[in-house]
Image: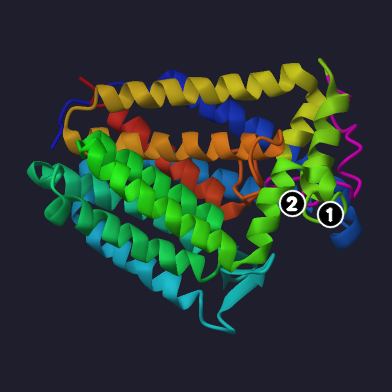
Amino acid sequence: MPKKKLAPDILLIAATLSLLVIGLIMVYSASAVMAEQNFNDSFFFLKRQLFFAILGVVAMLFMMNVDYWSWRSLTKVIIIVCFILLIVVLIPGVGLVRGGARSWLGVGAFSIQPSEFMKIAMIFFLAKYLSENQKYVTTIKQGLVPTLGLVMVAFALIMLQPDLGTGAVMVLTSVVIIFVAGAQIKHFAFLGILGLVGFVGLIISAPYRLQRITSFLDPWQDPLGSGFQIIQSLYAIGPGGFLGLGLGESRQKYFYLPEPQTDFIFAIVSEELGFVGGAFVLCCFAVLLWRGLRIALYAPDLYGSLLATGIIGMIAIQVMINIGVVIGLMPVTGITLPLLSYGGSSLTLMLTSIGVLLNISRHMR
């Protein structure tokens, strides 16, 4: 267990808090009109997001000051609880259905998304298992099968909701961790082919997924249906120009762009703050990813390195997919933009994960 403690990574903290503040401002700007219309309170979404932001910052500070090794012995308990939650959320009458997916559990006036917890739990499990069984990483039977087998069971439960976006992020993050741990490329190539076949099968099995693919390639083929979100997102980004229309001056948030405070919040950022605002957000993410990679490289042990790799890999994957969707380079997936998009479970767990990164940075070589 690492003993020496340094100061936490200040640049990582600065980038995180900058994105958090921008997110709070933009959540209010993007949601005020909808909140006033539906809840007679323009601050409805902001107040809920602020609550989870405060909760997340407290969790981040707590995790930053608790040695990451302390969670190693609790890994099995954490992942078992997450599997139980994934099963419970599928029970009719227990799990809440939103947007066609049974992905939430009601907790008082709020709700949690078990699949978000599973993403973090899987990172902790893989970091522990692979650091303890490094000699088996290059083998299929004792290396890839136990790890990817567990990942695919979790993915199957998430797909029963169904939530392809969150499941894909978890699988891709897991693949990054396993690859960095030393798995052979030839094994990944074989599994990649199987994964591609399975992905095609998932798309064919649900017509709406196929529509998302075709709408991504040509959204104007169905402008009022499957291509509507991408077109409205581009209509938001285009008029933003270099400096934007001004904070609070978005036109697309007036019921043109569906749920602008969640998956497409970057479109509102680009519309109101222009190229400059969008570039600043991307620069903050670049700093966050740079410092995270540095922490992974200089972690004091393999467990810390894999843990940091998983966390920063998850953030990078979500950012790339979300921005890709918003600018029309990828099909709509329903993946939020870390630290900016509205969503309690996602925001709190993202800040908690960054707290783990900050703790690893306090033990860097």
Residue 260 in magenta stretch: yes
Relative horizontal placement of residue 56, taking residue 74 as reference (left or right): right
- In-image side of 52 versus 299 (left or right): right
Give the amino acid at mark 1: Ala
Picture quarter with the C terminus: top left
Quadrant of the image occupied by residue 234: top right
The vertical placement of 234 against 294, above or below, is below
For label 2, the SS is helix
Residue receiving disc 2: 45
On the image, the x and y values in percent for residue 107 come to 56, 70
- Asked whether the viewer can see residue 66, the reply is no
Secondary element under disc 1, as helix, strand or loop, is helix
Which numbered dot is residue 249? none
Q: Position of residue 115 (x, y in %)?
A: 47, 60
Q: Are marks 2 and 1 in contact (CB under 8 Å)?
A: yes
Give the position of the N terminus as an image quadrant. top left
The secondary structure making up most of the magenta span is: loop
Q: Position of residue 357 (x, y in %)?
A: 36, 34
Q: How many angstroms separate mark 2 from mark 1 (CA)?
A: 7 Å
Point out residue 256 in the picture as x, y percentages from the top left corner. Answer: 89, 47
Q: Which residues are magenta?
A: 244-263
* Circle count: 2
**Of callouts 2 and 1, the N-terminal one:** 1
Residue depicted at x 51% and y 48%: 348
Which residue shows up at 88% across the image and 54% down it?
A: 224
Disc 1 designates what residue?
35
